[in-house]
Image (cartoon, helix red, strand yellow):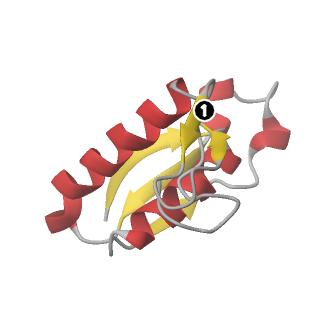
Amino acid sequence: MELLVRLPAVQAHLLRDRLARHGIRVFLLNLHVQGAVGELPPEAALAQVWIDDARDRERARAVLADHEADARRADGVRFCPACGEDNPASFELCWGCGAGL
């Protein structure tokens, strides 16, 4: 196993799901440590995303880069190529028809 990144728990779950869609198996650790902030430094209380197979390292880093880019692009609108519906920029699937954005 290899540590990929430390993130807040919600973001760790979103990244785990995104990696799973790419066939990359990961484990989430430190999910329940946030309550220790104050006793521990904040960065020590972040969830950890660990890659199960080191051979997936480069693909996982590419998915992580896309995930981070989407988080920076959270404002704005993405138009669905299938139905033309407008969706928040952070969506990966159209809320109207379910097509990939």
Q: In the image, residue 6 lies at what x, y percent?
A: 50, 40
Residue drawn where x is 52% and y is 50% of the image: 48
Q: Is residue 29 above or below residue 70?
A: below
Disc 1 element: strand
Q: Which is nearer the eye, 76 or 74?
A: 76
Spot the residue most to the front.
84
Q: Is residue 40 left or right of residue 66?
A: right
- Residue under pointer 1: 77
Q: In the image, residue 33 lies at what x, y percent?
A: 74, 47
Residue drawn where x is 69% and y is 49% of the image: 10
Q: Is residue 71 above or below residue 52?
A: above
Q: Is residue 93 left or right of residue 69?
A: right
Q: Is residue 68 left or right of residue 79?
A: left
Residue drawn where x is 67% and y is 38% of the image: 45
**Residue type, numbered disc 1:** Val
Q: Is residue 40 above or below residue 101?
A: above
Q: Is residue 67 left or right of residue 56?
A: right
Residue drawn where x is 48% and y is 67% of the image: 27
Q: Quadrant of residue 22?
A: bottom left
Q: Which is nearer the eye, 2 or 78?
A: 78
Q: In the image, residue 32 lies at what x, y percent?
A: 76, 54
At label 1, counting other C-alpha atoms closer than 10 Å, the crowd grade (few under 14, some 14-19, many 20 or more) is some
Q: Quadrant of the N terminus?
A: bottom left
Q: How many marks?
A: 1
Q: Quadrant of residue 87?
A: top right
